[in-house]
Every structure is written in C-alpha cells, then in structure tokens.
Image (tube, helix red, strand yellow):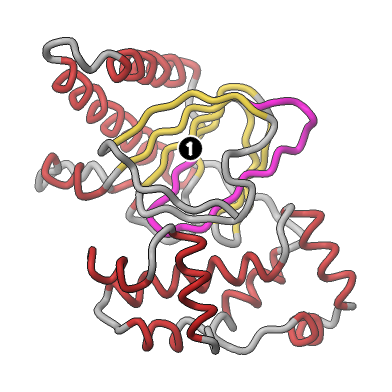
Amino acid sequence: MRNEKKMARPFSCDFTTSLEAGNVEFHMHSHHEIFFLLEGNIQYFAENACYPMTSGSLILFSVNEIHKAVNVTNAPFTRLVIHIQPEFVQPYCTPVTNLLACFHREPGVGNLVLLSQEEQARLLSMASSLGEIMKNQERFGNDVEAVTLYLQILVFVNRAWKKAGSSAGAPLPHRTQAIMDYVDAHLTDTLTLDSIAGALALDKYYLSHLFKSETGSTIFQYVLVKRIALAKTLLSRGHTVAESCHLSGFNDYSNFIRSFKQITGYTPGQFRGSV
C-alpha cells in the first residue's frame, strides 16, 4: 500500500502509460483528481460504484472519495491525470462560477463524463500545452500561463460535467455491490469475514475470493480505507484523535495511528493540525 504524497506544486498535469495504476489498492487523496483515459479499457471503482471506461472517458474524484482502477485487459492503458488542490482553486471561484462544482456531489455518483471527439481534442490540447509550460518554469511568464491554462481546464471540465447531467456515464452492476453496500452500512460495527458472509448468506471463502477477483483487493483493505476516510472527515470537523479512532470503527488506538499514517502519509495529529 503506497503512502499518499503531499504535492510540491499546487497542481499537476501528467500523461502516463502502464499496465496498472500508480496505486493498485483502494485509496483516496487530499486533493481532487481528473482522470482522462486516452487508450485502453479499464473499470474504475468510485466508492461502491464501478464505472466502465474506454478511450475518451473522463472520470472525477473528489477529496477522500475512495477509488481504484482495474485493468480489464493485458494491454497498457494511457491516461492524463490532473490533481487539484481545493485551497489553491478557491480564490479563483466567483459567486457565479464555482470551479470545484464538479467535485461537490454525492460520493460515487456522477463521476463519469463521456466527451465528444471535439471535447477530447480540446482537453488534450490544453493539457499538452500545460504540461509543456510546466516543464520550463524558468521562462518569464510561464507561471502565469500555467495557472491560466489550468483554470481553463477546470472551466472546460465543469461545463462538460454540467452538460452531461443525467446522461453522464452510468456505473456498471457488479458482483461485489452487495458486499460494499453492507460494509458501507456497517462500517463502524465489528466486521469479520464470518459476520459479513453470514449477513449476506454466502460462504466466507467464496465471499473473499469473489471480492479479490472482482476488485484485485481484499475486503478488509476496502474496509480499512473507508474507515480512514471517515476518520479524516471526523478530524476535519474538530473531533479529537481518540474520538475519531472510536467513531470510525477502530478498536485499537495503536492500529489506528499506524494505519492512518500508512495510508495518508501523516499521523492523525498532523492531519488535525493542518485543517
């Protein structure tokens, strides 16, 4: 499981090709993310929803929204990934233009946007220009040009998301839906493989194999990341570290501290002090 790294820059814009995503487990960020698939065929889990993605699909993830890519072929996939620090963008928002609107939605709902050929070309053009500018930050004015292009991309993405509305890409039905729904509904309860299997009337070995084969991760890795996301929310609302540990379903304080740092890259106390 890879630690979440704090971004050195207020935003990033990267093109990548590989057989698997940079983080192969369910994970979350302290920033928003725009993910545009140029080539390939993948499924993207967002919370308990699973979205099919082919070339030209764009998907959005907000702060703390659990997500994970699954490559459904043996071929590499190429994507554009843009990260957004909300606190950097907020000053550029106006009463009529909220550049973060596409991230302010129910988790796991409305993530996928299907772009037209013209929209795909425009996004690629802006992102390629932004990437080139960011490579040469010594040139006079490049910092201003980079911010300008970055904001234009956010305007474009929000317009595409708003235009898609109810016609946006719908999630796939998937065989782990009932498992994820049960975990989400009982996240702060004591969850064991036996208790989940019993509640769903499934053999526990079948349950474990099904989740792993569908998502590439274990049930308890999903549970762990969901609980850490809940803990982050509780900490940001003013709860103490001890309270957040208990209210997010952790029964062992030491395990909570260790897991929080492993997943986020910082301790609960450090996170609480930064919000």
The type of residue carrying mark 1 is Val
Q: Residue at x 89, y 78 (%)?
A: 203
Q: Is residue 196 left or right of residue 181?
A: right
Question: Based on the displayed image, in which of its 4 quarters is residue 148 positioned?
Answer: top left
Q: Is residue 60 above or below residue 143?
A: below
Residue where numbered disc 1 is placed: 113
**x%, y% of residue 197?**
80, 81
Q: Is residue 209 left or right of residue 224?
A: right
**x%, y% of residue 269?**
31, 73
Q: Is residue 187 above or below residue 207?
A: below
Q: Is residue 41 above or below residue 203?
A: above
Q: Residue at x 67, y 71 (%)?
A: 220
Q: Which structural element holds mark 1?
A: strand
Q: Is residue 69 magenta?
A: yes
Quarter of the image that includes the N terminus: bottom right
In this view, the residue in front, 192 or 36, is 192
In this view, the residue in front, 45 or 156, is 45
Q: Which residues are magenta?
A: 59-77
**x%, y% of residue 102?**
34, 46
Residue furthest top as drawn? 139
Question: Based on the displayed image, in which of its 4 quarters is residue 265 positioned?
Answer: bottom left
The 10 Å Cα crowd at callout 1, few under 14, some 14 to 19, many 20 or more, is many
In this view, the residue in front, 178 or 269, is 269
